[in-house]
Each structure stands twice: as C-alpha cells, then as structure tokens.
Amino acid sequence: MPIAFDDPRRVRVDGPRDARIVVLGEFPDDAASKAGRPYVGWAGKKLFDDLLFRAGITRSECLVGTVIPLRPPNSMLHQLPSIGVDVAEEKEECLKWVHEHPRDLVICLGN
C-alpha cells in the first residue's frame, strides 16, 4: 500500500491538478521534506526562477511532485524499504496523478 496521504512525512503534489505541465522529481530534497512541498529549496529556485522562467513557464501553471513522496535515508533509494516505502506502489500512485488529466509536457528531474 502506498504511503498514507495524511502521513506527516509525505511531500504532497503541489499546483493545479489539471495543469498542462508536470514537473516530476525523483524524491524530495531536505528543503521539500521540511516544507511538505516539492521544489521549494535551491533546486526549486533554480528551476522556477531561472530555467523555466526563461521559457515563459511559471510555477503556478505547473503540477509539481515527486515519484517517491518521502526523502530516503541518506538520499539512497535502496534504503526506502527500511522506512516502509514500496517503490513499485509509489510509482503506480505517481502515474495515476500524472495521467489524471491531459498534459502537454512532463519535465522529469533526477536519476
């Protein structure tokens, strides 16, 4: 079973559910884990205030999330089972919200 939606460790998907653009990361960084929102730290600033800004894309028009909604211990994906995360189930959950509405662009970040 995927991580419970109300689990306080979970970083939630952020933005309009029907956004035409999805920004999809691998897992939350430390800043996102603390804030409960993806891409709010250095990486988010670089992405939204620099790279996507130059392309004319704003955060408000994007649905922003991560495949895995919890930061793995030591940022090592292979350690996710040690904190109760089933990667295959989380991938399936991610695919559900990515495919929930038609999209024009999915920007994939991470490994």
Image (cartoon, rainbow, N blue to C red):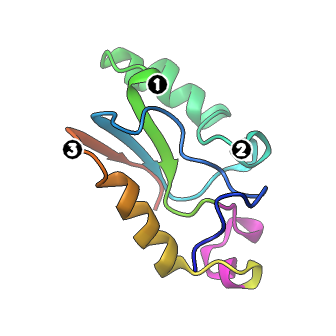
Tag 2, which secondary structure? Answer: loop
Three-letter code, disc 2 = Gly
Q: Between marks 3 and 1, how big is the CA–CA gap?
A: 18 Å
| Residue for badge 3 | 102
The earlier-in-sequence mark between 2 and 3 is 2
Q: Relative to 23, is 66 on the left or the right?
A: right
Q: Secondary structure at mark 3?
A: loop
Q: What residue is shown at x 79% (from left), y 44% (from top)?
A: 34
Residue 61 appears left or right of 37: left
Q: From the viewer's perspective, tell me whether residue 28 is left or right of residue 108.
A: right
Query: What residue type is disc 1 on?
Result: Arg
**Mark 1 burial class by Cα count in 10 Å: few <14, some 14-19, many 20+:** many
Looking at the image, is 16 positioned above or below residue 36?
Answer: above
Q: Is residue 80 magenta?
A: yes
The residue beneath circle 2 is 36
> Toward which corner of the image does residue 79 lie, by quadrant?
bottom right
User: Gap between marks 2 and 3, in whole Å?
Assistant: 26 Å
Q: Residue 99 shows which numbered tag?
A: none
Q: Position of residue 75 (x, y in %)?
A: 69, 65
**Placement of 63 over or under 51, stated as above or below:** below
Q: Which residue is mark 1?
A: 59
Q: Residues within 10 Å of mark 2 (few under 14, many from 20)?
A: many
Q: Could you tell me how far apart the alpha carbons at marks 1 and 2 are, in whole angstroms?
A: 16 Å
Amino acid at circle 3: Pro
Which tag is nearer the camera, tag 3 or tag 1? 3
